[in-house]
Image: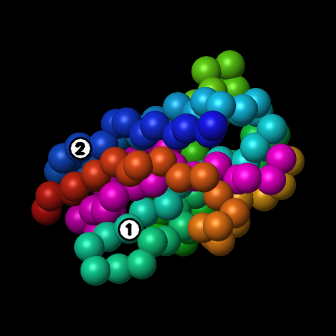
């Protein structure tokens, strides 16, 4: 059974930083693409960042480019999201996602991913 457990969320002032972690278990972590999505109150869940199963490819949503960095540590079965220069509009519940298809991409189709329970990030102005 695949499990994804996020941590690292919290309250931070605008301009500050947070690092989210997502610990995965239940299968061979290094075979699957990983990523982060977020959902703000009253809005739909949106893509934030993803990293390929091999770790050699990353992709970011435009609003976070240059501020957020996704990385993975296959030895620790963990994916990270380093968030710098945080803005109030980054406030959301952040969800870790893992592709269901081995060696495949992480897509935006929720049916094709496993999901964590989410961690709240609140950025005050």
- Is residue 93 or residue 84 the one in the foreground? 93
Q: Residues within 10 Å of mark 2 (few under 14, many from 20)?
A: some
Q: Quadrant of the N terminus?
A: top right
Q: Tell me the residue at 21%/56% (across/down).
A: 123
Residue mark closest to the camera, 1 vs 2: 1
Q: Residue furthest front?
A: 1
The magenta region covers 80-102
Residue 65 visible in image: no
Q: Position of residue 109 (x, y in %)?
A: 65, 71
Q: Judge whether 5 appears above or below 117 on screen.
A: above
Q: Determine whether the residue tagged by mark 2 lies in a helix, strand or loop.
A: strand
Q: Position of residue 15 (x, y in %)?
A: 26, 52
Q: Earlier in the sequence, mark 1 or mark 2?
A: 2
Quadrant housing residue 24:
top right
- Is residue 66 or residue 30 the one in the foreground? 30
Left or right, 21 with reference to 62: left
Check disc 1 and report the residue beneath it. Answer: 39
Q: Residue furthest top?
A: 75
Q: Residues within 10 Å of mark 1 (few under 14, many from 20)?
A: some
Decide: marks 1, 2 in contact (CB < 8 A)?
A: no
């Amino acid at each position: 059974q695949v499990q994804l457990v996020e941590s690292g969320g919290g309250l931070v002032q605008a301009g500050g930083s947070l690092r989210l972690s997502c610990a995965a278990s239940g299968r061979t972590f290094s075979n699957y693409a990983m990523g982060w999505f977020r959902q703000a109150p009253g809005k739909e869940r949106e893509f934030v960042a993803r990293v390929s199963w091999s770790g050699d490819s990353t992709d970011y949503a435009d609003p976070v480019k240059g501020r957020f960095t996704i990385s993975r540590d296959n030895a620790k079965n963990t994916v990270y999201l380093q968030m710098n220069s945080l803005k109030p509009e980054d406030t959301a519940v952040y969800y870790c996602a893992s592709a269901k298809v081995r060696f495949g991409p992480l897509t935006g189709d929720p049916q094709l991913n496993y999901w964590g329970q989410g961690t709240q990030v609140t950025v005050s102005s």
